Image: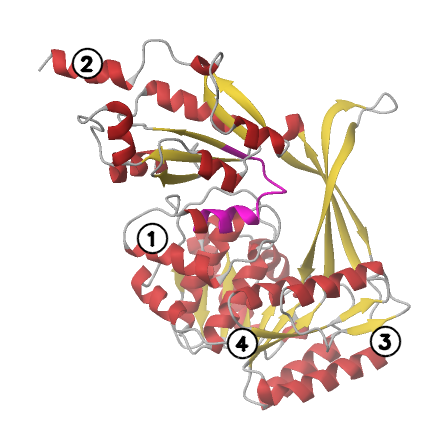
């Protein structure tokens, strides 16, 4: 990051609720999840037994939803069909507090719909197996273009900024793009463009900013970025001049983002490493944050650093999941304090898990974890393999004293949680004050509850709650000869 987390936090906390016009291709994303545990006898392909379906918005609709989650007032326009997918799309947008009154319905045009089939091996390990697209790429007619321009002119006076989200689905002809850019720029409004994966970018000429990803930028310039530090400045400069932009922003996945402003030296905004779960929606989230930040008056430099933050949060989730302003603030607070966002309170944990619960299998285990040893590490690694997210409950210091005696714990709750949070296998760490984690388990309702093999013939706290919700208890093997009690006794013996 170029700016400190404290500076970025101040910027986000000062965000208002700007009105942002989003124009672009509207897409409905459908996800079909099923168990894929055998091959078909008819052909060498997996057989998927459907478990459930999930629907989300995509394309420009996704940008609008992301903006709404951050507190903006997005106005969305584009075209969709008068069909079940179109109605589902508008219902989802309304639920997300996005103004849909400017969406143009075309009875003869199908709503662009992407259906992804997700195979679940052993009820977990998600893998996209196939994507089925139902759409037309034919250009929209002149009447639809006129209606869209009428929306633009009606909204321009009250909007702070305009976003163009182009998926090359037939909405943006070069003539329409140029009219939109001309009207917005004449009104003194910035135009931010997330371009399509096309070779010719002339339709975006005169925009304020363009935000291609690595693949899109290489396609548009015929420059391959084998070395980001060498080719990114050349590529950005070419786009800046060819398209008469004020700024070119290249999104470069693990390398962060490269910024070249007219009249300024270029700058690489590095990002910190993330556990990449799914890159879907990351580009939309970055565009939304750049728009939100600029509409609130931040510099491009601050907007870019914030774009890196939200893009990183997005790739840690499966599918397009809106990142609320509260989660961004929490992330920046943790960074500012040198902490980790893995350590959470129950309200924050439930908020995080809400977006994961259907798509990702949540595993829960708990313990004192006083002196972390090889047995603990193996146990937690095993627990993580049982699902997609591992939540670890940790007894408070007072709870440990009640259970283990006045001389325990050896390490404080803060230290024990910090060590657990450093493990790659652990997704979230949460403390509990009671002697058992029953209330915590009831609140989380994990799909899998993991305990040690020594519970084979013992009652497991939370079993009834988990099984009643359709989950199960799994017993983990122990590493022989490893225990905190033995380590403590050995320390006392050797003085």
> At which x and y percent is residue 265?
38, 69
Question: Does residue 187 appear to the left or right of 142 in the view shown?
Answer: left
Residue mark closest to the camera, 2 vs 1: 2
- Residue at disc 3, secondary structure: loop
The residue under label 1 is 334
Q: Residue at x 73, y 75 (%)?
A: 174
Contact between labelled residues 3 and 4, with CB atoms less than 8 Å apart:
no
Q: Mark 3 points at which residue?
A: 141
Q: Is mark 1 on a helix, strand or loop?
A: helix
Residue 488 coordinates in the image, percent (x, y): 20, 18
- Give the camera-side residue of 396 and 105: 396
**SS of the residue at dot 4?**
loop
Residue 432 appears at what percent x and percent y? 36, 38
Residue 294: numbered disc: none
Q: How many marks?
A: 4
The residues bearing labels 4 and 3 have C-alpha atoms spaced at a distance of 28 Å
Residues shaded magenta: 348-363
Which mark sits nearer the N-terminus, 3 or 1? 3
Whether residue 148 is visible to the viewer of this picture, yes or no, is: yes
What colouring does the structure picture have?
Answer: secondary structure
In front: mark 3 or mark 1?
Answer: 1
| Mark 3 closeness class: few <14, some 14–19, many ≥20 residues within 10 Å | few
Which sits in the foreground, 215 or 124?
124
- Mark 4, Cα crowd under 10 Å, few <14 / some 14-19 / many 20+, is many
Q: Nearer the viewer, mark 1 or mark 4?
A: 1
Whether residue 359 appears in magenta in the rendering, the answer is: yes
Within-10-Å neighbours for mark 2: few <14, some 14–19, many 20+: few
Outermost residue to the left: 495
Q: Is residue 4 visible?
A: no
Mark 1 vs mark 4, CA separation in Å: 36 Å
Q: Measure how far apart labels 3 and 2 are at the Cα level.
A: 80 Å
Q: Mark 4 points at which residue?
A: 245
């Amino acid at each position: 990051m170029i700016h400190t987390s404290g500076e970025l936090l101040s910027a986000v906390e000062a965000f208002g609720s700007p009105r942002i016009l989003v124009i672009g291709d509207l897409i409905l994303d459908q996800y079909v999840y099923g168990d894929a545990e055998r091959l078909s006898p008819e052909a060498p392909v997996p057989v998927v037994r459907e478990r459930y379906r999930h629907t989300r918005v995509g394309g420009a609709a996704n940008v609008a939803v992301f903006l709404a989650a951050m507190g903006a007032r997005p106005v969305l326009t584009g075209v969709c069909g008068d069909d079940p997918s179109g109605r589902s799309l508008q219902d989802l947008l309304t639920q997300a507090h996005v103004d849909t009154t400017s969406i143009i319905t075309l009875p003869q045009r199908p709503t662009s719909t992407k259906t992804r089939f997700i195979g679940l091996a052993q009820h977990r390990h998600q893998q996209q197996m196939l994507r089925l697209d139902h759409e037309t790429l034919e250009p929209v007619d002149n009447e639809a273009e006129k209606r869209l321009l009428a929306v633009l002119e009606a909204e321009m006076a009250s909007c702070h900024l305009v976003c163009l989200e182009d998926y090359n689905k037939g909405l943006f002809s070069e003539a329409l793009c140029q009219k939109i850019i001309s009207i917005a720029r004449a009104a003194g409004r910035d135009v931010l463009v997330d371009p399509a994966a096309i070779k010719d970018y002339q339709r975006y000429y005169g925009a304020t900013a363009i935000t291609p990803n690595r693949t899109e930028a290489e396609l548009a310039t015929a420059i391959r970025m084998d070395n980001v530090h060498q080719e990114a400045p050349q590529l950005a400069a070419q786009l800046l001049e060819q398209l008469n932009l004020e700024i070119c922003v290249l999104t470069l996945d693990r390398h962060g983002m490269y910024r070249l402003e007219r009249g300024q030296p270029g700058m690489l905004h590095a990002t910190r490493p993330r556990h990449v779960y799914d890159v879907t929606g990351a580009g939309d989230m970055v565009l939304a944050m750049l728009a939100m930040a600029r509409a609130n008056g931040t510099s491009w430099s601050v907007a870019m650093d914030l774009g890196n933050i939200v893009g990183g949060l997005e790739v840690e989730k499966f599918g397009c999941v809106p990142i609320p302003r509260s989660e961004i603030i929490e992330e920046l607070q943790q960074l500012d304090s040198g902490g980790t966002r893995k350590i959470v309170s129950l309200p924050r944990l439930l908020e995080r898990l809400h977006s994961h619960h259907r798509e990702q299998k949540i595993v829960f285990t708990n313990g004192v974890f006083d002196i972390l040893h090889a047995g603990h590490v193996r146990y937690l690694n095993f627990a993580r393999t049982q699902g997609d997210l591992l939540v670890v409950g940790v007894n408070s210091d007072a709870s440990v004293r009640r259970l283990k005696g006045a001389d325990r714990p050896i390490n404080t709750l803060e230290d024990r949680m910090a060590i657990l949070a450093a493990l790659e296998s652990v997704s979230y760490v949460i403390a509990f004050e009671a002697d058992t984690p029953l209330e915590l388990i009831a609140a989380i309702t994990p799909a899998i509850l993991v305990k040690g093999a020594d519970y084979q013939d013992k009652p497991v706290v939370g079993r009834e709650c988990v099984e009643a919700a359709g989950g199960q208890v799994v017993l983990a093997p122990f590493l022989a000869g490893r225990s905190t009690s033995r380590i403590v006794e050995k320390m006392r013996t050797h003085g």
